[in-house]
Amino acid sequence: MAPRVRVASVTHGDEVKMTIPGSELEIHEAAVPVEDDAVVKVAGRSPTQLAIARFRADKLSMISFVLSVLIVLCAIAAPILVALGVLNPNEPHQNLLSDDGVLPQGAFGGVSWDHPLGVDPGLGRDLLSRLMLAISSSLAIALTGTVITVIIGSILGIVAGFSGGLIDATIGRIIDLTLSFPQTMMLLAMAAPTVQLLRNDVGDLPGLGFLGKADLANGVFVIGILAVFGWPPVARVVRGQVLSIREREFIEAARLFGASRRRLYFREVLPNVWAPVLVYLTLLVPAYISAEAAFNFLNVGIKPPTPTLGNILAHSKDYTSGDPTYFFLPGFLLALIVVVFNLVGDGARDALDPKSHR
Amino acid sequence: MTNETINQPIEGDPDDMAVAPRIEGHSAAVAPADAKPILEVDGLRMYFPVKSPGLIRRTVGHVQAVDGVSFQVAEATSLGLVGESGCGKSTTGRLITRLYEPTAGAIRFEGQDIAHARAGELKPLRREIQMIFQDPYTSLNPRQTVGSIVGAPLVIHKVLPKDKILPRVQELLEIVGLNPEHYNRYPHEFSGGQRQRIGIARALTLQPKLLVADEPVSALDVSIQAQVINLLQDIQNEFGVAFLFIAHDLAIVRHFCPEIAVMYLGKIVEIGDRESIYTNAHHPYTQALLSAVPDVKQAAAGGRLERIRLQGDVPSPINPPSGCRFRTRCPIAQEICARHEPPLLQIGRKHKVACHFPGRLGEAPREPLTAGLLGVDSEGRPDPGASPSTDLVEQPGYADTWFDLDNKSIGRA
């Protein structure tokens, strides 16, 4: 009854009095409270907070998250421990190698209390120290590469999606061009001259002196390659999201208030595309860790003696039968890191988009 | 129910209208006596280019969304803009708020033409003209709290210091009937009606003089529509805001707007005060629209006026019919309608109609009334003896003299 009365009160304003007494109308008006005063003090939960709650409820995601935090902590701790002298990744132990001077003495690659994971063949360096430091350098490359990729991809994606027209078309063609470029060829052909350029010419510029070091120049080259060839998919994902968001009325509302372009991009649009970008980010880290490892087989990337997961693995492939532990450990670690980060990414996607199903 | 109430006709007298619903303060809105116009729209046109697909995107046509629309909105009153989907009502609203730049025509707000104002010139204007959107589910950013949504205009225009924004936001939330403590909640925690109230609060933040309400209640539950309409009326009474009220619900427009313009395919076909449109419609399209409004009273009496069913669909605005745009569906169209576009003739103190055969339902004249003015014969062919009238230029407001169709004479104010 109530709704019908209310319709009458508005839609047939001048005729209501003939059918329904006014007093009755007032009762109905009062009967439906606009506000619910019982829950005054409850603070709102943002979509992000709701997503975190969903993430926490998922056991597998939480286990992976804890593991990935441990891995990151390990990566942060390694250089500090090296500096403190606890880890010695480059100290050779010829006495721990067998008579031929190559393979380590003892079972499982020479496991002992001093060297819990054994030593590496050839020089007898502590494998635990080398692996921990390797996680450090590999993660540094992967994370930096990911962040740069995501920043380039999101900005270009938002600009393309929001502006449309010629700008969109231009960015679209750049994406096509980048994707169709023979990446591996570029990588191999450019590696030596680019690293040389970084070390000698760019490294001479003020403030960029750190590039003079071989490891850093190699690392920057790998990060550059990952970022330059990695952003197009991010830009595409973001552009697709922006295309649907820019048609929503809250964008028009913001325009109506005279919001600047920057405000539209970063305050109105970006928070709404943040979810897929975050998912992409967590999936890019493991992809870049394994990409860094793969580059080492092509002789591109940070060279020994500085350890990375890639160059340890590349080195160990010669000892698969002689010292299987040395081959197994970096491989296992690489697989573990990739799986764990992927699971975190999956969990983040499920938490941020509760409607999706695996 | 007495006979009197049944016979109380559709043409009820205006006084009746003002007192009818007994909810205090929410009677049908009445226009102030002689308010001066705050907004004047003159010959507004919006043509959207249609591009060919492919690499070279040539313009192959235009969607004539709004094609020569003129009207006035007076201070602290409401003009209702009605018409079916796709007739250009929303485009008109977006042109006035300058979300689009018009192809031609003038939009004078307080005497200043804003039709082609640049972004910098528009910014101060943004405080004066605001908009209430149709869909409360997409008009609020899901990632922002209510506080930052409502407070955003204050931040952008830097009108208040940071610590004064929250109290103002809470004040606004209270004005629109929401709990001011809910400023830190997110839109998804509110119902449709509450969301629309948030949208209204946001539109009010900068204390605008003109609000364009683009179907503000059509996305809401019918039981909530009344509350929101009442809120809009309260706001109009309290702050003296003028409304351009875009809707397709004729009953709500009748309640809310003292003046109504009916649009069809980008043009105004009839414009006038409430009584002229609802009880004295002279355009066949307005009559058809009105006959489609369900009427509780007539249903109770066991019968209702026969509904006028229009044949066919609205023609494409890319290629509108020649002459009168309504002629393809018009029950009384004749030869002249295909040849000449009917001018918007003033036929009452506040009543204009664009039809060659204007008349009350079933009383349309046989001969086109406009033939003499256009200098053509009754079939629309050029008449060498007649000379076209020169004063057919459309004005946004109303003239002091008009053609009184009942007395076949010139009426005077």
Image: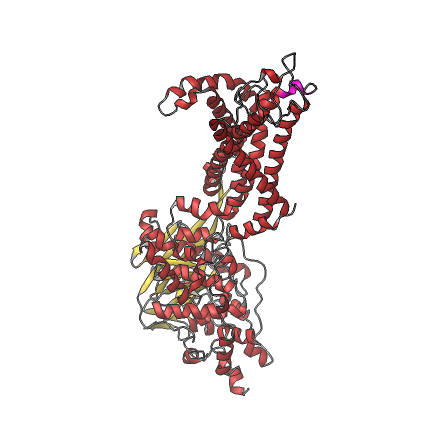
Residue A317 is inside the magenta segment: yes
Give residue A322's quadrant in the image. Answer: top right
Q: Residue furthest right?
A: A321
Quadrant (top left/top right/bottom left/bottom right) for the N terminus of chain A? bottom right
Residue B176 vs residue A351, the one in the foreground = A351
Expressed as whole percent of the image width and height from the top left, the position of residue A46 reads: 50, 54
Q: Residue furthest bottom?
A: B2
Q: Main secondary structure of the magenta part?
A: helix
Q: Is residue B280 visible?
A: yes
Query: Is B379 located above or below residue A316 in the figure?
Result: below
Residue A170 is inside the magenta segment: no
Q: Residue furthest front?
A: A113
Quadrant (top left/top right/bottom left/bottom right) for the C terminus of chain A? top right
Q: Is residue A173 visible?
A: no
Expressed as whole percent of the image width and height from the top left, the position of residue A82 reads: 49, 27
Q: Over which residues does the magenta segment extend?
A: A316-320
Expressed as whole percent of the image width and height from the top left, the position of residue B386 reads: 38, 60
| In the image: residue B254, left or right of residue A123 | left
